[in-house]
Amino acid sequence: MPDCCIDNKWVVYAGLGGSGNKLWRVPLSGGSPEPVVEMFARFPIISPDSSLVAFNYFGAPDPPRRGVAVVSSHGGLVMKRFDINNSDPSEPHVGFRPMGWTRDSRALLCLRDSQGVSNIWEQPRDGRPAAQVTHFEAGRIFSFAFSGDGKRLAVAKGSITSDVILIRNVK
């Protein structure tokens, strides 16, 4: 999923395959893409001040390292790595959960699941301990977003259910 900076001048996206496992940025007015950082990165999000990009990363396969990294949007300098497992608990090897930024770009907003219940946690960029933002007692958060003024939070929440049906002797 690509993300566009606040002034609509450039977009950042994760490139895989022929272009390599990198984060790229490209001007919306046209031009050549330029690498932001060279690492296996997925689902970048740009900070509200457009100075930083957070993304899910994968490190060396032995031992496997994964987490969330924050880099400078212009130089690709890794500012911080967090041991945040941002994988979808129902698809730990495939899916990723949504992340966000606080309005002041000082912290990341991430989902944590405990016993099937999701809550939003705020992880300060300076490495201080994360603080719980929501206190839901049931349900799973699929997506969230703050209003433009930062005063309201919209949350898409529910449950995942599935059934298995065996059909035999179909004519």
Image (cartoon, rainbow, N blue to C red):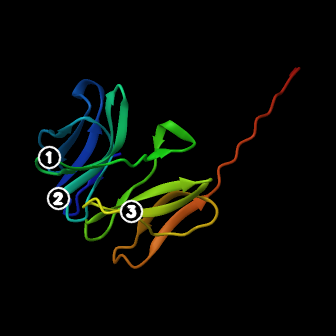
Name the residue beneath numbered marker 3: 130
Which residue is found at the position 47% from the left and 63% from the top? 120
Q: In this view, does 150 lie above or below 42?
A: below
Q: Is residue 117 left or right of residue 124?
A: right
Q: Tell me the distance, in whole angstroms, between the alpha carbons under discs 1 and 3.
A: 23 Å
Q: Is residue 142 left or right of residue 22?
A: right
Q: Which mark is residue 77?
A: 1
The percent coordinates of residue 125 (x first, y second) are: 26, 60
Name the residue beneath numbered marker 2: 51
All told, the count of numbered labels is 3
Which residue is found at the position 18% from the left and 45% from the top? 25
The percent coordinates of residue 122 (x first, y second) are: 38, 64
Of 37 and 115, which appears nearest the observer?
115
What secondary structure is marked by label 3?
loop
Q: Looking at the rendering, in which quadrant would you find the N terminus?
A: top left
Q: Which amino acid does label 3 sit on?
A: Ala
Q: In this view, does 122 lie to the left or right of 37?
A: right
Q: Quadrant of residue 6?
A: bottom left
